[in-house]
Image (cartoon, rainbow, N blue to C red):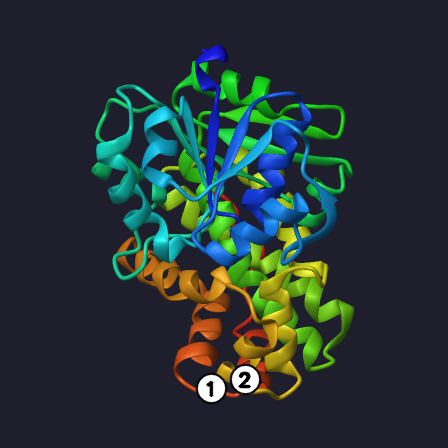
Amino acid sequence: MAEKLLPTLVIGAGAWGTALAIAIARKGHEVRLWARDQEQLRAMQANRSNARYLPDIRFPEPLSLTADLESAVREARHVLISVPSKSFVDTLRTIKPLLQPGVPVSWATKGLTVDDGQFLHDAAHEVLGDSHPLAVISGPSFAAEVAANLPTAVTVASPNQAFADALVALLHSQTLRIYTTHDIIGVQIGGTVKNVLAIAAGISDGLGFGANARAALITRGMAEIWRFAAAMGAESETLFGLAGIGDVILTCTDNQSRNRQLGLALGSGLKVDEAVKQVGKTVEGMHAAREVLLRAKQVGVEMPIVEQVCKILFEGYDPRESVQALLCREQKAEVRRPA
């Protein structure tokens, strides 16, 4: 199976797609990176780096660039998608008629589909059918640190163990550790909801509420993730791992997180459009918040932190009042005793 993954095509030359392409190429595997922006592509070809997102990181020799998506997909033996969640389904529809039979598809996109809140593996199965093995790559990982070859650990989730093992062979190294699981639902929930929690944590810190409030938001946010994951059929152990609590800790506490940056800007007093402009890059938590809340209501799960983030983002609520409302909710037991 591992041999069939060569060459790999990475669709999306943002920070994370580029970092993964670099990681694959560092292991000596041939990898092609496709970028939509032709000006960016020409600059990357000339400089052998992605100056826009990962300045000073040189491309390894096995990494090549392409503007020809049609030929690249037809020739690929593995397609790795790293595009914003709002573009995920359109990307699948574009590549479907170009894929060779049985070519596996993985993605590093975190979120749900826009408007209907589908998990990405459900959307991928709906578009591609049963003939292409599927996997998601998730976990606590800033692209800049992966590209700089700093120690990182992530999770590959796939119901197809052979494909998961092949991705380990493709990516695992001394500095990038790859763990595997079959719980593709749990991994996607962790990677999605943590972005919403990071906005909340950033808002709290931007307001100056302190470390205690941040810790409370993170901890109670994890409780929301566990409730939602259980209702959706995920395994609780997954949320104790890299794709769950690991990613929550990273995204909620480090200022490299775009979602935390957005929250900090909102907490400092900027309006939503001003905060988004200040971040200047895709903030997946904004797209995810409304969809997560919709799915949670459908399965009867209470997610008060996600709800307050939605009110701030889409209903004009004052961040200070929203955080205060969370901290002043009715007292209850933290752990319910069995009846």
SS assignment at label 2: helix
Amino acid type shown at disc 2: Glu
Q: Residue 274 bears which disc, if any?
A: 2
The C terminus, quarter of image: top left
Q: Does residue 241 appear in this view?
A: no
Q: Residue 249's x, y, as percent? A: 67, 52
Nearer to us in this view, 157 or 25: 25
Q: Position of residue 152 (x, y in %)?
A: 71, 37
Marks 1/2: CA–CA distance: 15 Å
Q: Quadrant of residue 68?
A: top left
Few, some or many residues within 10 Å of mark 1 (<14, 14–19, 20+): some
Question: In the image, residue 79 lies at what x, y percent?
Answer: 41, 31
Could you tell me which residue is drawn at 59 percent across and 41 percent down? 139
Q: Residue at x 63, y 66 (%)?
A: 260
Q: Give above or below for 25 relative to 17.
A: above
Graded by Cα atoms within 10 Å as few (under 14), some (14 to 19) or many (20 or more), the crowding at tag 2 reads: some
Amino acid type assigned to the residue bearing label 1 in the image? Tyr
Q: How many marks?
A: 2
Percent from the top left, x then y, of residue 269?
A: 62, 88
Look at the numbered disc 1 and give the secondary structure of its residue: loop
The numbered dot on residue 286 is none
Q: Nearer the viewer, mark 1 or mark 2?
A: 2
Quadrant containing the N terminus is top left
Q: Which residue is mark 1?
A: 317
Quarter location, residue 169: top right
* Residue 124 seen in the figure: yes
